[in-house]
Amino acid sequence: MSEPYRWKATIYFRTEKNGVLDVEHNFMEIEDLHEIVERGPSWQAIERIEVVYCGLPEKLTVEEADAL
């Protein structure tokens, strides 16, 4: 069984024929997003990027995390 991913990024690209195209990417380290963007299509066609944390199901508040 493969390791679960920590992050999901949805990159929205502008297209001429189909409007905005959304492409999802799953990855472990936030620094990996850089390589995903660089692979293309061109970053100049990006409308926006949404990043969501998909890690542990445990939901902490800022205060609870500070106490760890």
Image (tube, rainbow, N blue to C red):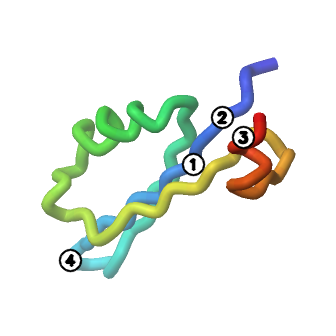
Q: In the structure shown, which secondary structural element does the residue marked by tag 3 occupy? A: loop
Q: Which mark is residue 26?
A: none
Query: Label 3 near label 4: C-beta < 8 Å?
Result: no
Residue type of the residue flagged with mark 1:
Lys
Q: Quadrant of residue 26?
A: top right
* Residue for badge 3: 55
Classed neighbour count for the residue bearing mark 4: other residues with Cα under 10 Å, few (<14), some (14–19), many (≥20): few
Q: Which tag, 1 or 4, sits closer to the chain's start?
A: 1
Three-letter amino acid code at the position of disc 4: Glu
In screen coordinates, is 5 left or right of 56?
left
Q: Earlier in the sequence, mark 1 or mark 3?
A: 1
* Side of 22 relative to 53 (left or right): left
Question: Label 3 neighbourhood size at 10 Å, few (<14), some (14-19), many (20+)?
Answer: few
Front-most of 50 and 20? 50
Which residue occupies the foreground of this view, 53 or 21?
A: 53
**Callout 2 touching callout 1 (CB < 8 Å):** yes
- Mark 1, mark 4: which one is toward the viewer? 1
Of the residues under marks 2 and 3, which one precedes in the sequence? 2
Mark 2 nearby-residue class (10 Å; few <14, some 14–19, many ≥20): some
Q: Whole-percent x and y of residue 49?
A: 39, 62
Asked if residue 30 is positioned above or below residue 50 in the image, the reply reads above
Indicate the secondary structure of the residue bearing disc 4: loop
Comparing marks 4 and 3, which lies closer to the viewer? 3
Residue at horizontal 23 percent and vertical 50 percent from the top: 41
Q: In the rendered structure, which disc, 4 or 3, sits on the residue that comes first in sequence?
A: 4
Q: Residue drawn 17% across and 52% down?
A: 42
Q: CA distance from mark 2 to mark 3?
A: 7 Å
Q: What is the distance, in whole Å, between disc 2 and disc 1 at their CAs? A: 8 Å
Q: Are marks 1 and 3 in contact (CB under 8 Å)?
A: no
Left or right: residue 2 compared with residue 16: right
Q: Element type at marker 2?
A: loop
